[in-house]
Every structure is written in C-alpha cells, then in structure tokens.
Amino acid sequence: MTVVVWTYLDEILAGLHTHGMNAAHYFITVPTDIIRRRIEAQSLWPKDPARDAQVRAWRLAQVDRCVQAAQSLPAGTITLDGTLPVEQLAATVTGAARG
C-alpha cells in the first residue's frame, strides 16, 4: 500500500503501537515507467471492462503523486530497490524484522 499523507502513516503506526505491535515503514522504489507498465498490464475487473478502464485511469493518475512522496520520506523509513528480485526484497525485509 502506498501512503502519501504522512499524518495518516503516523496514525496507522501509532494505532498499531497502542495495541503492542511494532511496525516498520518500508518504501519500495520502482521506476515510474515500470509502475505504469504494471498498471496497464493488470486487470482488476476483467468481467467489467468499463470499470476496469476507470480504475486503471485512476491508478495511473496517482503515480506521479506517489512517486513524489519518495522525496520526503519520514525518518526511519526503510527504502528498498524495487528492481531487485522478489526473493532478495523478501530476504531484506525478513532480515530487518529479525533485527
């Protein structure tokens, strides 16, 4: 999930902390052209082409705003290179979680 309003992220993490859960904030950087290609290739509503097109257009319209969020990440954010293989990303996350 991409959270681009940092006060929302603070609220989410504080809520988890209130219930005794610690959560890290990860941000995966992916080149914009790859993000757009992935959105274009994905079908969320295959039985409803009109809705699928509407959702796709909305998602594409959000890309620049989400990419811009990378310029002001909150302190403590763990940044991952989204061009790396999934297995390597998963190993990085599990390694960080173990401390």
Image: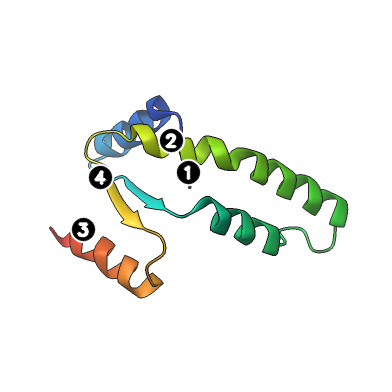
The residue positioned 43% from the left and 35% from the top of the image is 69
Asked if the residues shown at circle 4 and circle 2 are in contact, with their CB atoms under 8 angstroms apart, the answer is no
- Res 42 visible: no
Query: Where in the figure is residue 22, as x and y percent of width and height?
Result: 23, 45
Asked if the residues shown at circle 2 and circle 1 are in contact, with their CB atoms under 8 angstroms apart, the answer is yes
Kind of residue sitting beneath label 3: Ala
Q: Name the residue that disc number 2 marks.
A: 69
Left or right? Give the position of 85 relative to 22: right
Q: Name the residue that disc number 4 marks.
A: 21
Q: How many marks?
A: 4
The answer for how far apart the CA atoms under marks 2 and 1 are is 9 Å
Determine crowd level at label 2: few under 14, some 14-19, many 20+ residues with C-alpha closer than 10 A: some
Describe the element under mark 2 as helix, strand or loop.
helix
Asked where in the image residue 34 lies, by quadrant, the reply is bottom right
Q: Nearer the viewer, mark 2 or mark 1?
A: 2
Q: Nearer the viewer, mark 4 or mark 2?
A: 2
Q: Name the residue that disc number 3 marks.
A: 97
Mark 2 or mark 4, which is nearer the start of the sequence?
Answer: 4
Q: Name the residue that disc number 1 marks.
A: 2
The answer for how far apart the CA atoms under marks 4 and 2 are is 25 Å
The foreground one among 98 and 68 is: 68
Describe the element under mark 4 as helix, strand or loop.
loop
Mark 4 or mark 1, which is nearer the start of the sequence?
Answer: 1
